[in-house]
Amino acid sequence: MARRRRSTEIFSMSFLDCMSCGFGAVILFFMIINSHVNATTENDNSELMAETNRLEIEVLEGRKNLALARNTKQKLEVEKEDADSKIAQIIALIQELQAELDKYDQDTLAKIERVEKLQSDIKSLQEEVRRLLAIKTEQDQAGEQIREFKGEGDRQYLTGLKLGGERTLILVDRSASMLADAVANVIIRRNKPESEQLRARKWRQVVATVNWLTTQFQEDDQYQIYMFNNETEPVIRGTEGVWLTAGDGQQLSEAIRVLRRTVPQNGTNMHSAFAVAKSLSPRPDNIILLVDGMPTMEAATTDKTRVGANERLNIFARATRELPSGIPVNIMLFPMQGDFAAPISFWSLALTTNGSFMTVSRDWP
């Protein structure tokens, strides 16, 4: 029996197996490549995502900061508006207060003027009371005076002289200039007899002034009267360096009689006069100086026939150094014509020593 011939098939199992293996290898190859691509893509995406997230966070932070800045700006604008409003209110208040202050200042000035006027009135009244009390005191003490002195018409004398103190030293200038108020008249009077010189108006005024001063002493007061020209000596001889008691009225009267008989002559030596204050023990607590001009000499004798104004000032300045400190010097100036430095110099001395200064008029006392 004849064999049946097999039919030949193109796609056999072996071929299919090969094709399946090939397809499987391709698929496996694509899968391997795909996984690798996915891994690479995932790695790249993670970095990009991180960067993206970071940028997003920064954007969010920026937006947040921007929002905060806008809020802060709005808040500051509101605060600025409030501050401007408050400033305007404060300025208005200051202006109102300034207006009130101006009004108060005007009222205060008016009150101050009224107060000052009242104080001035009170001061005037106090001075009037003191003046009246002084007059009353003088009247009360009039009966206690050791000696009496009356001016023309029984005049009462009000002066700025400080006449108090337990020990009073009176220094009387008896130089030739006491004969007249002008140098020419001094020369004329100096060449006349002594009786004419003693009647010189200026010298009689000096003696009358000393007489008036002695009437102001109290009974327990101590005093000393020195007269000086080129030399200095006590009016009552033999009392050098001794304090006299004002209670002895006869001694005071004798001092005035001696002065009336004394003739003014020679130059003016204030060194020796001021040195007396230093030599007395105890020292005086009040000095009264009766003088008509600046000194002309520093010793008992001199060979100079003329002394200039500047030199006289220097002599005076050196003479004042002889005065003890702490003693008031009260000056009664009988002015000499042409001696322009005398008033200011003696006024300065009185001011420096806490004393008083008085220019004596022609009809005093």
Image (cartoon, grey):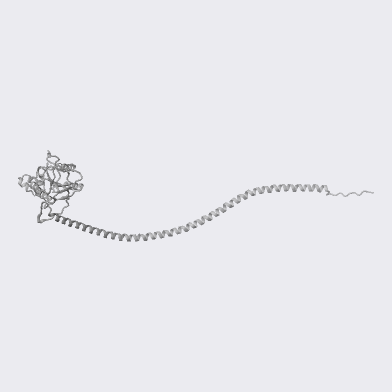
The residue at the point 72 percent across, 48 percent down is 31
Q: Residue furthest right?
A: 1
Percent position (x, y) of residue 261?
A: 7, 46
What residue is drawn where x is 36% and y is 60%? 97
Outermost residue, top side? 303
Q: Is residue 32 left or right of residue 365?
A: right
Answer left or right for 25 relative to 73: right
The location of residue 69, given as percent across then percent down, is 51, 55
Q: Residue at x 5, y 45 (%)?
A: 194
Let me know if residue 33 appears in the view.
Answer: yes
User: Number of labelled discs?
Assistant: 0
Q: Is residue 302 above or below residue 6?
A: above
Measured from the top left, where is residue 310 in percent x and y? 17, 43
Examine the rendering and report whether any part of residue 202 can be seen. no
What residue appears at the point 14 percent right and 56 percent down from the top-left corner?
Answer: 140
Which image quadrant is residue 228 in?
top left
Return the x and y of residue 197 as percentages of the image width and height: 6, 46
